[in-house]
Every structure is written in structure tokens, then in C-alpha cells.
Amino acid sequence: MIAKPGEETRPLFAPDTGLACAVVPAVNVEPRQGAGAPHLLILHYTGMPSAEKAVRWLACTQSRVSCHYVIDEHGAITQLVPEGLRAWHAGVAYWEGVTDINSASIGIEIQNPGHEHGYPDFPVSQMAAVAALSRDIMARRGISPSGVLAHSDVAPARKIDPGEKFDWAFLHARGVGHWVAPVPLDPGDAGVGPSFAGPAVREVQAGLKRYGYGIEETGTLDEATVVVLRAFQLHFRPARVDARLDGSTAKTLARLLATLPPIPPSA
């Protein structure tokens, strides 16, 4: 990467993985804050027309963002931030009580122009590279499958990436991410929408909260619940992302929760 006159740059560093094809040091980095070793892996799409432009943007001072890795549409991997440092990729976010997601995570940006620019499918070669890099990071960092999340999971009110076309089942088959087969849609079940209230809503809110989402048990499909439902569907029930509570969504959540380790009894 060639710096413009007066632009801040950082020295090259040794990549953390042998899978990296290039290193382009990003400027917007800092030490991790109080969270210890990263225990989450956050997957994004770039939302930019090309991986080259994404790398340049994520590496420069003016962007006010950065990430650890970028994977282009062919599967080539560029590292921008050493894994030991805090990249600026998640923004205002939350998971399982953690609010400084940047300190607790490693961020991978996957080249895709995004929903605003046609949102093409993710090529198989790219998905294979995502799987390989994620496995490598998980093994070295001790990250559990359920710690591999979408940007939309940790920031549901702001983000929808990597979106409903992202193939989480493909990753899970290769040892990456937590996944169960979604319960099929019932054509006769349109679900319920905003402002609906009842015990079923509270039960789903409790389940989403247990899984890690930032949500309160109000018993009503309030605005916060609606955006979390959408995030859950984007990741775990992508066949219909409408942010409505239907049987397929509720049953898929229950199926997912049933595969988690039991909650240890309180002392």
C-alpha cells in the first residue's frame, strides 16, 4: 500500500497465520482493553465495490475503522491488524454482557458490495477461505463454535451483514460456527408483528437473551425485539427475513438452544 503525503502509516508486521497472502498495516488500532484474549470471531461484509478499495479504506486514518483480515472474492486473505491488537470493526455492539466487542473479538471483512449494491452470492472459493481462516483462528485462540457471529448479531439495530445469502451451513459443515437446520416455514403461518404481546413473546425473548443477544424480556414485540428477531433470522433462519415471530423462528431458536451446554447451577 502506498501512503499519500502526510498520511500516517504503521510498520509491517509478521502475519498471525500462514494463510495470509499479504499484510497491509492499518492505522486505526490500539491495545485491547480489559477483556483478555479475544473469545469472539465477528464476520462482516465489506459493502464496497472491490476488496482493493476495502483494504485501502480499512487501513487509512480517515476511515475511523479497521479490521484484522479482509478476504477477497477469490479467497485471497490480507491481514491488516495483528490479532493481539484491538481493531475498530464492530462499533457499538453487545454479546453475552460484553459491550466492548472490539476488545473481545477478531474481525474478518468478506468482500461483497452488500445489499445496497446488488448483494451477489458469496463464491465457494471465498467461503472456503473464510472457513479455513476461521478454523485457524478458532484453533489458535480457543474460540468456540458459538463464538463465531455475524456483525448483525452483535449490532442488530445498525447492521445486517453478512446477510441472508451468507452460507453458515457451509461453515458449520467445516467446523466453524454454531448451527442447526432451520425448522421449515409453514406457508400458513405469517407470524405476528410489532406490538404483539403475550407469553410466547416473553419466552422467545428469554431464549434470545440466553443465546447472547442484547434483549430484555418485556413480553411485547417492541422495536428492540423486532431488530433482534431480524438478526436471528438473517443468521439462523434466512429463508424469510421479515422480523416477524412465527413458529419456524421460535422452533429454530429452541432447537439451537437445545444444543448448547447446560447452564451450570448457581453457587
Image (cartoon, helix red, strand yellow):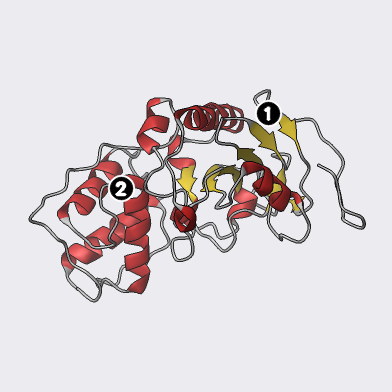
From the image, tell me which residue sits under label 1.
20
Q: SS for tag 1?
A: loop
Q: Are marks 1 and 2 in contact (CB under 8 Å)?
A: no
Left or right, residue 52 beside residue 131? right
Left or right, residue 18 beside residue 46? right
Q: Residue furthest left?
A: 188
For badge 1, the amino acid type reads: Ala
| Whether residue 71 is situated above or below residue 203 in the rendered picture | above
Measure the alpha-carbon separation of dots 1 and 2.
30 Å
Task: Work out which quarter of the rendered image holds the N terminus and state it.
Answer: top right
What residue is rendered at 44% in x and 44% in y?
A: 120
Residues packed near mark 2 inside 10 Å, few (<14), some (14 to 19) or many (20 plus): many
Residue 137, percent across and down?
59, 32
* Towards the viewer: 225 or 193: 193
What residue is rendered at 77% in x and 40% in y?
A: 24
Q: SS for tag 2?
A: loop
Earlier residue among tags 1 and 2: 1
Tag shown at residue 76 = none
| Whether residue 73 is situated above or below residue 66 in the rendered picture | above
Residue 106, percent across and down?
61, 43
From the image, tell me which residue sits under label 2.
238
Left or right, residue 152 beside residue 110? left
Q: Residue furthest right?
A: 6
Q: Quadrant of residue 80?
A: top right
Q: Quadrant of residue 136?
A: top right
What residue is rendered at 62% in x and 53% in y?
A: 89
For badge 2, the amino acid type reads: Pro
Can residue 233 be seen here?
A: yes
